Image (cartoon, coloured by chain):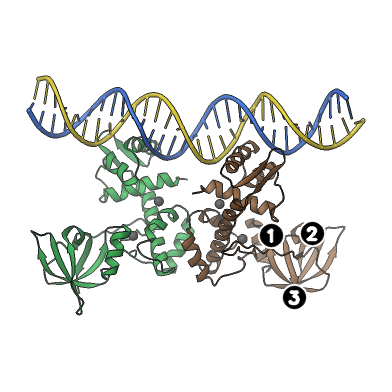
Chain colours: A green, B brown, C yellow, D blue
Amino acid sequence: MATSTVENYLKHLLLLAEDGEALVPMGALAAALEVVPGTATTMVKALADSGFVQHRPRLGVRLTPEGRRVALNVLRKHRLVETFLVHVLKMDWAKVHDEAEQLEHAISDEVLDRLDALLGHPQTDPHGDPIPSRQGKLHSQVYATLATCTLDRSVRIVRITDQSAEFLRFAEQHGLQPGTAVRVADRNLPAGLLAVQKSGKAPAVSLSLVAAGKILVEPAR
Amino acid sequence: MATSTVENYLKHLLLLAEDGEALVPMGALAAALEVVPGTATTMVKALADSGFVQHRPRLGVRLTPEGRRVALNVLRKHRLVETFLVHVLKMDWAKVHDEAEQLEHAISDEVLDRLDALLGHPQTDPHGDPIPSRQGKLHSQVYATLATCTLDRSVRIVRITDQSAEFLRFAEQHGLQPGTAVRVADRNLPAGLLAVQKSGKAPAVSLSLVAAGKILVEPAR
DNA sequence: TGATTTATTTTGACTAATCAAAATAGCCGC
DNA sequence: GCGGCTATTTTGATTAGTCAAAATAAATCA
Ligand SMILES: [Mn+2]
Ligand SMILES: [Mn+2]
Ligand SMILES: [Mn+2]
Ligand SMILES: [Mn+2]
């Protein structure tokens, strides 16, 4: 069995690669795992020996099909656990990431399946992150963000791509959560600022472009 | 934070001591944890340095109040998780012990509290094992067993004290689960056998005395 | 091209947890 | 009261994962 350290390395490689073919630089992997680069190098060589990754010395590392399979299963556990914690246990969506970071290594595939059924086979977790299917399909669409979408057009928030508790709490405070319909009322490029208007007469929310870039949207139907 | 190894040592010491004052022999602890005795000795010395146990060399080991506090919290997690898995996820009661063995180290105190509330603050787990209270009270009553209770008297099963999947599956197959009313129709001491009769006209179940001793009962109200 | 900066890898050391096997202590019989 | 059995402890080695710091390779700049 893969240890939880191994699972974490593989999961982070999956998240850092996205497409799957790109080589992840050792430094990026080390930073994501909060270890020094030498540690990541050592570990990656062990992972390569186990057939989970391909290591191109000095260039980077990428998952093998087997490594990707394991990583997708861990990611599925992570996101289904987050969904369970928010929807069933009513936990704060800003706290569930840290919980899931542990639980993703402790639940069996059988518990995973039963959780999935209990939750009604959700497609995304509470932050809008797509949940890999049981068969290992991960459909991560490309979305516009509040920083790039059309001005004054009604859009629906679909995903928050920053897991940090501070950002999630901020977003919740202003009602910027997946499912919410909003529109960018004003964008001031030089100032790096924009104003988001929720439907109704709530006051507009002021956001930096960086923050707005973390909020993915799709055209409201 | 205590590692999951430390948590397992403390939990097993709690289960092996029961009353709390008895010294647990090193061999018993090693056997429970499935490690060689030398490993247990080494670990116990480390636990003593951390203040979790008191080690009387060559005599045995027992929990300190702090060790007991930690152990009760782990045991509470274990049994609440088992209850969740059976009652919410509808898992086989013979499988949940192994699942809980992992999950007991991965869930936070906040998740614990919310699980407890979701389940309606249960007093016992699916096997009838008492769940320690949030405050660390563990009321383990002394019960009669099917091997010792009055002959031909209606009793209610309250607890199965064998966690093994085989025994639990056997018990379930014959409807010998907590809550079920039964009566010992016949006991043959020389043969080491007894017959258990469920209410209704189901055929009597034949049990060895050893097996019967693992099924705790109380007088049916 | 040659020197400097930066990323990566290597080396040596450490911690937690484990086992195999040798040493030891305590008890038990006679 | 001495010899032997048994449980426990000690010793030496191993594995997984980590860091600090030195070595090296590659990229960038002069
Ligand atoms: Mn994790
Ligand atoms: Mn998420
Ligand atoms: Mn455990
Ligand atoms: Mn139980």
Same chain for the residues at labels 2 and 3, yes or no?
yes
Q: State which tag comes first along the sequence, 2 or 1.
A: 1
Amino acid marked by disc 3: Ala
Residue linked to disc 1 = B161
Whether residue B135 sits left or right of residue B20 in the image: it is left
User: Is disc 1 placed on a helix, strand or loop?
Assistant: loop
Amino acid marked by disc 1: Thr
Residue linked to disc 3 = B220
The picture places residue A131, in percent across and down from the top left corner, at: 34, 60
Report whether the residue tagged 3 is closer than 8 Å to ligand 4. Answer: no
Q: Nearer the viewer, residue B75 or B89?
A: B75
The picture places residue B200, in percent across and down from the top left corner, at: 73, 78
Amino acid marked by disc 2: Leu
**Image quarter of the C terminus of chain A:** bottom left
Residue linked to disc 2 = B209
Q: Quadrant of residue A164?
A: bottom left
Check the residue under mark 3 and report the chain it is in. Answer: B
Whether residue B58 sits left or right of residue A210 in the image: it is right
Q: Kindly identify the residue that appears in the image at 47 percent across and 64 percent down.
A: A114
Up/down of A34 relative to A73, above or below: above
Say few, some or many: other residues with alpha carbon within 10 Å of mark 3 (under 14 / 14 to 19 / 20 or more): some
Labels 1 & 3 near each other (Cβ < 8 A): no
